[in-house]
């Protein structure tokens, strides 16, 4: 006697397209070969509606075994780098050796042969001018820092710009101007200021002298934060570690977290290659 199921006319539905008609053996062959996936639906004459293929005993038996999904990749570090660090304002009477060195450097560049004569003949004028400029740079720096601390970064920028114009080696102004740029969303300008402190030999030397404020370390730490936010993990870790070597250890926990995630990701990738 003929099996009515074997003689039935079958159809398949997958990804919005209907296929068929097929005999049951033909349909089973398409599923066993992978032409139709297990999530396709099937229907035959006499059925009230389409049914998932996996729910049909006649077809489920020939479906390829389901390969367990690989374990998820380790999640990247959560985006929680700390806030950028800045330098607190200093008294307006504080001296700035960088201003005087900047003035001397400027004279030397403009008239190398007359530096000694100029300093000797106009020594008093130079010292007075140096003190005046030191005071002006300090006042501008303090004004910018006060605006920055009051969360008015756009108002802070002109003060830092003018301070740097007067003294192009004023590392603290570069640092806080970079923070102002970050607060305003200008990452490229912020990086340029942090890079100037780290990579310009003169400014770096001044930043190193400001050891009590860890200006160089703060520049590294802020650059690490930018790299962190951009998910440039290796570069972020390098800068966090450089910051720690220059007195700013705040980022080391974050550096360890990133390194752990990188190691976990590498192990997961290696396991995936072995499975293939």
Image (tube, rainbow, N blue to C red):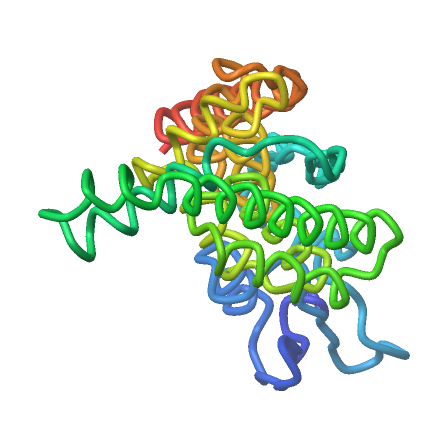
Q: Is residue 3 above or below residue 221?
A: below
Residue 20: percent from left, percent from top: 57, 84
Residue 237: percent from left, percent from top: 49, 27
Residue at 43% x, 40% y: name it.
Answer: 124
Residue 35: percent from left, percent from top: 47, 66
Classify residue 21 as left or right of residue 126. Answer: right
Classify residue 159 as left or right of residue 275. Answer: right
- Give the camera-side residue of 124 and 221: 124
Residue 184: percent from left, percent from top: 70, 64
Q: In which quadrant is the C terminus drawn?
A: top left
Residue at 29% x, 40% y: name it.
Answer: 119
- Give the camera-side residue of 122 and 258: 122
Q: Is residue 1 visible?
A: no
Based on the displayed image, in which of its 4 quarters is residue 55 positioned? bottom right
Residue at 85% x, 55% y: name it.
Answer: 151
Q: In which quadrant is the N terminus drawn?
A: bottom right
Based on the displayed image, in which of its 4 quarters is residue 266 positioned? top left
Classify residue 243 as left or right of residue 203. Answer: right
Number of on-image labels: 0
Point out the residue furthest to the left here: 113
Q: Is residue 16 above or below residue 32?
A: below
Classify residue 67 as left or right of residue 54. Answer: left
Residue at 43% x, 32% y: name it.
Answer: 234
Q: Is residue 128 above or below residue 246?
A: below
């Amino acid at each position: 006697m003929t099996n009515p199921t074997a003689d039935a006319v079958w159809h398949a539905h997958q990804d919005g397209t209907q296929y068929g008609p097929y005999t049951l053996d033909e349909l089973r062959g398409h599923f066993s070969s992978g032409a139709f996936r297990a999530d396709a639906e099937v229907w035959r004459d006499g059925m009230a509606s389409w049914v998932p293929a996996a729910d049909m005993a006649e077809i489920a038996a020939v479906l390829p075994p389901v390969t367990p999904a690989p374990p998820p990749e380790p999640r990247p570090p959560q985006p929680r780098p700390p806030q950028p660090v800045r330098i607190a304002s200093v008294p307006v009477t504080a001296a700035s050796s960088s201003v005087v060195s900047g003035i001397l450097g400027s004279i030397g560049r403009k008239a190398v042969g007359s530096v000694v004569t100029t300093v000797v003949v106009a020594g008093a004028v130079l010292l007075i001018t140096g003190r005046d400029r030191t005071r002006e740079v300090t006042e501008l720096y303090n004004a910018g820092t006060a605006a920055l601390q009051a969360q008015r970064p756009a108002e802070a920028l002109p003060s830092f710009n003018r301070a740097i114009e007067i003294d192009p080696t004023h590392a603290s102004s570069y640092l806080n101007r970079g923070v102002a740029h970050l607060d305003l969303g200008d990452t490229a300008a912020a990086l340029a200021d942090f890079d100037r402190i780290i990579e310009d030999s003169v400014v770096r030397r001044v930043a190193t002298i400001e050891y009590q404020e860890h200006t160089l370390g703060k520049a590294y730490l802020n650059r690490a934060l930018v790299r962190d936010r951009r998910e440039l993990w290796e570069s972020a870790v390098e800068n966090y570690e450089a910051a720690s070597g220059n007195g700013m250890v705040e980022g080391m926990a974050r550096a360890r977290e990133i390194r752990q995630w990188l190691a976990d990701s590498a192990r997961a990738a290696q396991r995936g290659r072995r499975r293939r």
